[in-house]
Image (spheres, rainbow, N blue to C red):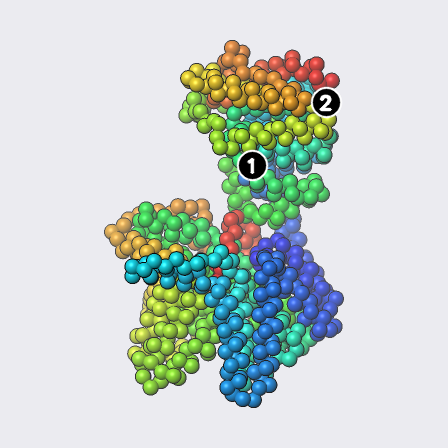
Amino acid sequence: MAFNSLSFAVFFCLFLFAYWRLVQKSLTLQNLLILAGSYLFYAWWDWRFLFLLIGNTALNFLLGIAIADTKKEADRSWLLAAGLIQGLGCLFFFKYYNFFAVSLSNCFSSLGFKADMHTLNIILPLGISFYTFRTISYLLDVKRNKIEPVRDWLAFFCYVAFFPCLTAGPIDRAGTLVPQLQVRRVFDYDQASDGMRQILWGLFKKVVIADNCAIFTSDVFDQYKTLPGSSLLFGALLFTIQLYADFSGYSDMAIGIASLLGFNVTRNFNYPFFAENIVDYWRRWHISLTTWLTDYVFTPLSIRFRDYGNGGLIAAIIITFTAIGIWHGANFTYAVYGFLNGCFYIPAILSGTMFKRKKTAAGPTRFSIKAFSNRVGTFVLVSFSLIIFRAESLGQALGYYKGIFSTSLFSRLVITEKRYTLAPLAFILLMLSVEWWQRDKRHALQIGFIKRFSVRALIYFGLLAIVLVFSATKNTDFIYFKF
Amino acid sequence: MKRGFNFFALKSLLFMIPVVIGFVILYGLDLTPIITDSALFDHKVAAMQKQKVKGVKIMAIGSSITLYSINSAMLVQHYRMPYYNFSCWRLQMSDILAQLKVYVPEHHPEYVIICSSLGDFRFGADSSFLNYFNTSLFVRQWLPELFYVQHYSSVWEIMHRMHSNKHIAIDHWGGMELTIPLQERDWKAWNERWPFPTDKTSGQYRAMDSVAAYLRDQNIRLIFIQAPIKASYGSVPGTDRLLAAHFDTCRSIMERNDAVYRNYYDTTIFTDTLFNDQYHLLTEGGRIFTKKLFNDLDTIIK
């Protein structure tokens, strides 16, 4: 039940009606409905993994209380360790077991030993990376006394399974979402309208831009051996746009759906293509994951390595980014992608600019060649690293790079699916223009400053018309569902 | 004044009205939704829905062979019974079976005519037809615009499909004539031989047996016609044996299920000039075919 499917539309309309019309007077009923809806939403994909989700939630609920109620620090640490082992163990088993088994087997074979590691036919449970990170952060925060444990089981179960964010984030912390689950939600017209606008913008990005780009980028990555360097370069740049439109489109829809239910969830993107350097880019990309890893991996590591100066900081950042890479999946490509992005930080660390933040100016600004070239440079750098992210293997990534840096880079661009590629280019330009104009807002369709209703309605219908006329017929799954 | 959920829901519904109107207009303009992989099928179901085709007594069904071979106007004039040709390009026996199981309870026909050739036994079933057949009768008959959303295709894609299939011109009874001027003829297809049998052929024979058995159980008379094939096809060494084996299989299946079997593979009547390619009759060929059909069916269809 993807957000852009008819089944979800029907489910959500019924859910919304029940939520605001039938159970709006009682907090318990509101939460019960959210929990039932979330489990139905999850079971729609595969009911068997619902038990894993419920078991995981129940265990973390009990561990959270146990950690808070235990006085002895050592016991608290053991309880935390039990939670981490369970969460990371499940993640390892479902996501990484086969990868490590095959890698170890290959490693032994290359050393001349015969080792047949047993691989399992494992399906990756949808959203496991997201809800595991949610429960881990909860246990860590309770252990660090940053938050009180949640003693209301219903609120905690809703927090873990909250359906708008269950399958691909944003990864909300308990400190943000649980307090909202503990008070009765009252319908707020402005919040709901804003949610609808954000859903519309997310839908536009997903079905018009990401899905159309996917048709060309899939072809380019499949046929990279035969296509000229110019097409490969174009494909790499387009894939960066596709990934952004796909994931930020999903996040916009998730946040918009949560807004319709009266929740404010964590923002996941802050117009990353307007970043002037890679550090700024990572502050704006998949914010809920990067802040999670900053809080629970980078900060503890940098404190531990503080005696080693810049070297310690570089080590901490590289470990953090490699973890970001590996979080995406069991493949060396992700690890190398993360490592490479960690390396991109080195100049910023050495020059002492890593922690400097530049405020985003709103509206039109004077054109600056320097700022523009910085943005283009950052975009190209990101695109080049995303080739590894997109490739099936390191060999394919290397072949792709070789293809780009060949004489065919200057040959005529070959576009395999012109019908699906050229028109969306105009919409990419539209997306970037609107987002540039609205870059100080939480999402691009916050157009409350336009006072005339007719103009606003024209914009909504215009966008809806673009979605209906130009969306890709072949819907592709949200890329981050597989993580 | 504080605006509540009712106001919000009403406003959201009002915003959706132009979209619904848009779909109704598209449907009215024959920019029909993409339901299956077959453009002709989608076009035909929309035409049937608009015509409110019901109570068909003589049902023709099959692939392009049935579609082009039977001249609808001649047949309707001759038998003066409700008739419709449900055929579509590339339909295989398994697809025919799936369609019959939906159309027969809706129309209660008395006779089913299948004109067939080797091409109907070459591929597996087309699962995209299930998009249509698995949808409720109510939606198919009264709310076909829902297909725009249910099997979503962009308007751009729909227009593109319509443009590439602008030559589709079905008559009032679902039939089509193959009228291609000599200069526009695809000469590559003139002597093109489709690979036969394939790994799917035996499965399609089984499906054919199921078709015949199903219609027998429903007390519907099945008339199976082996369509003409161009003379040059049989002139290739070894083909005679292959054709004879196919004809025998079809005949025995039909006889086993009390169905009528006729074979029109006659290169003296159906000469090369009547064909568009190895298997498909041009308009004039269709007329001769339909006349011959009357000679055989007059004793059966009453």
Q: Is residue A312 above or below residue B247?
A: below
- Identity of the residue drawn at 52% across and 71% down: A87
Question: Where residue A106 sits in the image (x, y, percent)?
Answer: 35, 59
How far apart are labels 1 and 2 at the CA level?
31 Å
Disc sitting over residue B81 in the figure: 2
Name the secondary structure under disc 2: loop
Most foreground residue, A417 or B216: B216
Chain bearing mark 2? B
Q: What residue would you read off at disc 1?
A: B125
Most foreground residue, A349 or A390: A390
Name the secondary structure under disc 1: loop
Q: Is residue A362 above or below residue A11?
A: below
CA neighbours of label 1 inside 10 A, class few (<14), some (14 to 19), many (20+): some
User: In the image, what residue type sits under mark 2?
Assistant: Met
Question: Where residue A262 sits in the image (x, y, percent)?
Answer: 64, 71
Confirm whether residue B6 shows in the render.
yes
CA neighbours of label 2 inside 10 A, class few (<14), some (14 to 19), many (20+): some
Confirm whether residue B174 shows in the render.
no
Q: Residue furthest bottom?
A: A71
- Identity of the residue drawn at 63% across and 54% down: A7
- Identity of the residue drawn at 37% across and 73% down: A319
User: In the image, what residue type sits under mark 1?
Assistant: Ala
For the C terminus of chain B, give its image quadrant.
top right
Question: Where residue A350 sits in the image (x, y, percent)?
Answer: 30, 78
Q: How many numbered circles are shown?
A: 2
Tell whether A290 sits left or right of B295: left
